[in-house]
Image (cartoon, rainbow, N blue to C red):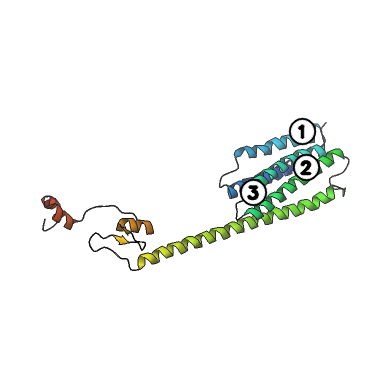
Amino acid sequence: MIRLSGHEAVSVLVGNALFVLTAVLRLEATSRFLRGVPAGRAYYLLIPIVTGILAWFYFIEPSISLRNLAMSLTVAGICLKMAWEFLRHAGARRLVLYRAISFMMAAFAAALLLRAVLWCRHPEAGLFEASSFHAPYVLGAILGEMGMGMAFLLANSQRLEEELADSEAELTARLAEIKVLRGMLPICASCKSIHDGHGHWEKIESYVQRHTEAEFSHSICPDCVRRLYPDYAHAMNQPDA
């Protein structure tokens, strides 16, 4: 039995498909933010699959409670995946915030599933009726959406603060190294080794490489060629060769 057709059916299916797409994009953003990689193309297959299920329970076996159950299972599963990702990447500096975000997303998923189950048990309740489970769910959904938005802002803000602190520490270390190299270095007048201040003499190449990002590529200058290899001095393009 076909319940409705035309623009109303299209609007319902497209609206639900966009809702699933929004959830998948949030998972994509979470994966890129925490792991630096996409969530995977398989999650985008949920959009046509869920849309097909919704169309079945809209046209073939009309049931708004079963459509809601299908939507709730999908979105709740995505929320639980996001909660697991935040919990799995909760390091020492992000432990409290990421655990709070994970708990909030898991609670939102539980609320979705609870409402879907209650609606299946009481299918006579309308979507916009102020029933014992619709009204609290709507309020919780609004608070949950606001909470997830704030959670992403806080997580991004904390990451920026950590990156700034790491950059400052690295800059401080670089400046300290530059200060050491600008100071007076005790160097051997014969072999050119440098005293490291801890009782050891170190080759100048090793010392510079250890305190800077410079690397050495050994060659030989023309004066040394003439002094050490006079037989080959004529091969150089020098006036006195």
Q: Check contact, mark 2 vs mark 1: CB within 8 A.
A: no
Helix, strand or loop at mark 1 = helix
Measuring 35% from the left and 56% from the top, which residue is drawn there? 209
Q: Is residue 21 visible?
A: no
Q: Reading the chain from its start, which is encountered first: label 2 or label 3?
A: 3
The location of residue 110, given as percent across then percent down, is 76, 45
Foreground tag (2 vs 1): 2
Q: Specify the quadrant that holds the C terminus.
A: bottom left
Q: Reading the chain from its start, which is encountered first: label 2 or label 1?
A: 1
Name the residue nearer the viewer: 9 or 72: 72
Helix, strand or loop at mark 2 = helix
Dot 3 amino acid type: Phe
Measuring 50% from the left and 60% from the top, which residue is drawn there? 167
Q: Which residue is mark 2?
A: 113
Q: Residues within 10 Å of mark 3 (few under 14, many from 20)?
A: many
Left or right: 49 with respect to 216? right
* Distance from the alpha carbon under mark 2 to that under mark 1: 21 Å
The quarter of the picture where residue 191 lies is bottom left
Dot 2 amino acid type: Leu
The quarter of the picture where residue 46 lies is top right
In the rendered image, the residue lying farthest to the front is: 199
Q: Which residue is mark 3?
A: 86
Dot 1 amino acid type: Trp
Q: Which residue is mark 1?
A: 56
Q: Reading the chain from its start, which is encountered first: label 3 or label 1?
A: 1
* Distance from the alpha carbon under mark 3 to that under mark 1: 35 Å
Left or right: 79 with respect to 132? left
Measuring 31% from the left and 56% from the top, which residue is drawn there? 205
Q: Residues within 10 Å of mark 2 (few under 14, many from 20)?
A: many
